[in-house]
Image: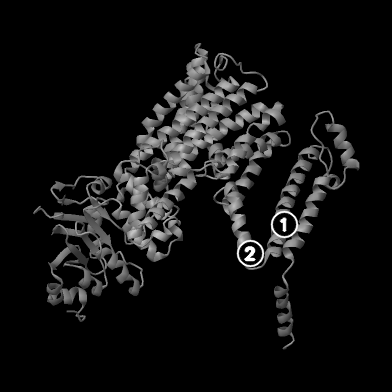
Amino acid sequence: MAATATAVSDAGMALEAQTRWHPAEFVFWAATLLPFVLFPNHLQLASQVAITALFALSLDLILGYAGIVSLGHAAFFGLGAYTAGILSVHRWGDPFVGLVAAMAVAGLFGYATSFIVARFRHLTLIMITLGLGFLLHEVANQASWLTGGSDGLQGVQIGPLAGLFRFDLYGYTAYTYSLIVLFLVFLAVRRLIHSPFGLSLRGIRENPVRMPAIGAPSASHIRKVYTISAVIAGIAGAVLAQTTSTVSLGAINFERSADVLIILVLGGAGRLYGGLIGAIIFLVARDQFSGLAPQFWYFWMGHLLVLVVLFVPGGLLDAPGRIRNAWRRRRAEGRQAEFVRRAAGVSLLASSYALLVISLLWWWSFFGKAPLALGQLLPCLLHSTGPCADTALAAYAIVGQRPYPPSIMWIGLGCLAVGWLLVAIRRPRAKALPGTSTGGSTVP
Amino acid sequence: MTAPALATQGLDKSFGSLVVASDISIAIPQGARYALIGPNGAGKTTLINLMTGMLRPDGGRIRLGETDITSLAPDQRVKRGLARTFQINTLFPHLSALEAVTLAVCERQGYAGNFWRGLPAFSDAVDEAHAILKSLSLGPDATRLTRELAYGQQRLLEIALALATRPKVLLLDEPAAGVPREESGELFAAIAGLSQDITVLFIEHDMDIVFRFASRIIVMVAGSILVEGTPQEIAADQRVREVYLGGAKHG
């Protein structure tokens, strides 16, 4: 009897262990304070990251947990942004008032559309969410008397936070505000996913056919989570409007819906932190790239997305676990050295690919406009001196574009060589193969 | 008490010109163990789908105890005590066995709408789920992910999920499908050990098991009921021998 009691409490404890805070979570949230100290000039960017993370978190609730794919989630983000913005134009600039109003409007629209969403799955659902997104975008575009249309909303006046803290130019208040809102919503979502309702959502994701067979009203669960998700997206939109004092069609367009989906898939859907990590990587990388060659941003995003979906379908947060598993397998076979060597080789090859493509793009964007033949331009790939370099440097020094450094090409070639060597080395056992083939060739 | 646990009356269903159920009328008394047999394509699974509401009948009524459930949605039928399992595993691959059964218990208890309190707070649901798993000897593997369980264990989990809904009537669609012969007896022993309050209708192809565990047998052929009777009657029935058993030795 005593043994039974222990076994039962063990079962409960196994579930409780999942809800407990992991040390890495404390580290993560402590690290969110670092921008105040380390990057005080990038607090606006940090604020954008927090807002996007919040938006991704709201998508994670429906996509990662309930398995509902949405390509029009910006509709709710935009509703929140426009609600907060329009209120402030009409002298309701208090951030909290705007926030609550945005929640109400986004939630109401979410609840209304949830009745359609809960009935469908797969492609139909994607098309419905896409259509709703387009629909709201066009409404925002056409109703320019209310929204400012394609010019954006004019006259957004956000009052001080809690009546005390003005939104400053450096984004100190903005990041504080975004971070607090993100953290509070995160706490609520974290509670939700560990609740019986959260378990039911995972059930819907795992097997929508089985749910009704265990007496679960899936449609009502979906309506509920879709509304909650819409409210959170509305909050994110409102915070963006308030911290930047601008609302444009960019808050509600398809690109925003697509970006947040990419962010979530990159980071890892259904993992609570996937959207957060994804937002950091996406926005910081974009910020860095925009200084270099902004036109290639989606080129690289495309690479990353394809690679992640092919090799770590669970998202980047899934990668450590996969690498650990692979390492354990190899260790069990006693092939640690080979694992390390091949891993290093593959990483070097990947880096060399990135470096070589970057150098080609950079080289072409810098020298391509110079009045020289291609044959004269080619040496510039490898040398920073010579006629083409002189011509181009003279011509473009004024523009202020950063000159192409040939060292990138050299490093890329080095990585390629070393990486290829590391991957190509065969184990002694494999060396037996050429031996047998020569043995065979001696027969005739 | 005299009302049958589950009854159908003149159930019809056809897909285009293909008749999959025609005039199915059965009445399963409280606590009975019925087997539903018939050649492939006879409409056995279709009948279960009709009774559980996964398919809408073209005509006819379905009664669960005293209530007419013909127009109810599948999940509402489950709430009224009609549960089923699936011939092909229809489980939650990335939930642990314990989570999956707890999910079913929470749905029954009405906890599933709660999004504010952690799952461990509903210890009665968790304990009940664990007790169900232990009763089907899945206790030691309760915390493993469903997809990591052995196939036979997954078949048991199918039944555990159905039991978690506290059914009055349990419809088992080939519970031992794909399980090696020597293990299927074990699985049916677990089914035989179920409370007599639960009425059971099961589909099974293994005649030894059917004759061992069923108190009555319904034989379906081409969408309609050929004959219904005790195992002895069925074994002696010439039509069944011709149509289904193909003259094989039985009884």
Work out whether residue A262 or residue B177 is closer to the camera in this orientation and state it: B177
Q: Is residue B121 visible?
A: yes
Residue A175 in the image: state x and y as whole percent.
Answer: 61, 26
Q: Amino acid at mark 2?
A: Arg
Residue A409 in the image: state x and y as whole percent.
Answer: 80, 48
Residue B201 lies in what quarter of the image? bottom left
For disc 1, the chain is A
Q: Which residue is mark 1?
A: A344
For disc 2, the chain is A
Q: Earlier in the sequence, mark 2 or mark 1?
A: 2
The single residue placed furthest to the right in the displayed view is A386
Q: Amino acid at mark 1?
A: Ala
Q: Residue at x 24, y 57 (%)?
A: B170
Left or right of A205: which side holds B50? left
Work out whether residue A340 or residue A362 is closer to the camera in this orientation and state it: A340
Q: Which residue is mark 2?
A: A330
Residue B203 lies in what quarter of the image? bottom left
